[in-house]
Amino acid sequence: MPARKKKNGNGNGNGNGTNRRMKRKPPINLDHLKTIDPLTDNQTTAFDAYKEGKHLVLHGAAGTGKTFISLYLALQSVLNPETPYEKVYMVRSLVPTREIGFLPGDHEDKSDLYQIPYRNMVQYMFHMPDEASFKVLYDNLRGQETIDFWSTSFLRGVTLDKSIIIVDEFSNLNFHELDSIVTRVGEDSRIIFSGDYSQSDLTKSNERSGVLDFMKIVQAMPSFECVEFGINDIVRSGFIREYLITKIEMGFD
């Protein structure tokens, strides 16, 4: 399994790694995935940096496709048998329901609270003739844990190997949470942060400043590409695009 409990000592938990690059059989044929091209210059920058093997921080205006392209690039990698990646982890804090731990059920039950938007994104990415066919495909992705949804509340002590980790709405995480997530990245894994650090549901000033401190760290790391999306990157159409642009232009961002 790509997720493993963190071990003490010097072992890397993966032996000598001699078989890591063997071809594996993905749960879904890559041919079912649509070819989706970047729509803006900043999306192109994100695509190119990902192809270069970099970790990503995609931040900025709403409606610019940050989460969508993160999930698309991750699925493209996981469904390619030539890559070492086996799982996509969608991670987020359920602010304002950070008290998710007090709700009944395990993390799978609780994560159902926020899976619907991601399911809709996945549906757009695949060639499927009807809703029933997509349901079978999505159930396979979920049943075989190709896509897994986690709250930050359940990551302690876990190392995520051979995975693409997407941290969505990262601006709702404090520095301790962001720091903890980065230390969960294991062998043959990559991480993508998506959100807008100028907007946050965090109410304490020290927590909000922690997000800025985290950004300073990753911006100084050569292994990260930080891409800021602005008003010209909004890809939503019609009424929603008009609303988002007007809101930003009036300073309500």
Image (spheres, rainbow, N blue to C red):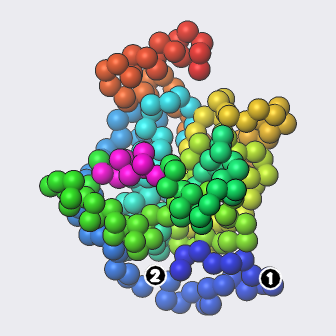
Q: Residue at x 44, y 58 (%)?
A: 74
Residue 119 included in the magenta stretch of the image: yes
The residue under label 2 is 21
Q: Kindly give the residue lying farthest to the top in the view shown.
A: 250
> Dot 1: what SS?
loop
> Dot 2: what SS?
loop
CB contact under 8 Å: marks 2 and 1: no
Residue 24 included in the magenta stretch of the image: no
Observer-nearest of 26 and 224: 26
Main SS, magenta region, reads helix
Magenta-tinted stretch: 115-123
Which amino acid type corresponds to the residue marked 2 in the rendered image? Arg
Of the numbered discs in the image, which one, if any, rests on residue 8? 1
Among the two numbered marks 2 and 1 on one chain, the one whose residue lies closer to the N terminus: 1
Q: Residue at x 26, y 51 (%)?
A: 35
Residue 92 x %, y %: 60, 51
In the picture provided, is 116 more to the left or to the right than 106?
A: left
Q: Does residue 232 appear anywhere in the picture?
A: yes
Observer-nearest of 124 and 216: 124
Can you say whether 139 is above or below 82 in the image? above
Residue 145 x %, y %: 45, 71
Q: Quadrant of residue 79?
A: bottom left
Residue 113 x %, y %: 52, 50
Q: Residue at x 69, y 48 (%)?
A: 98
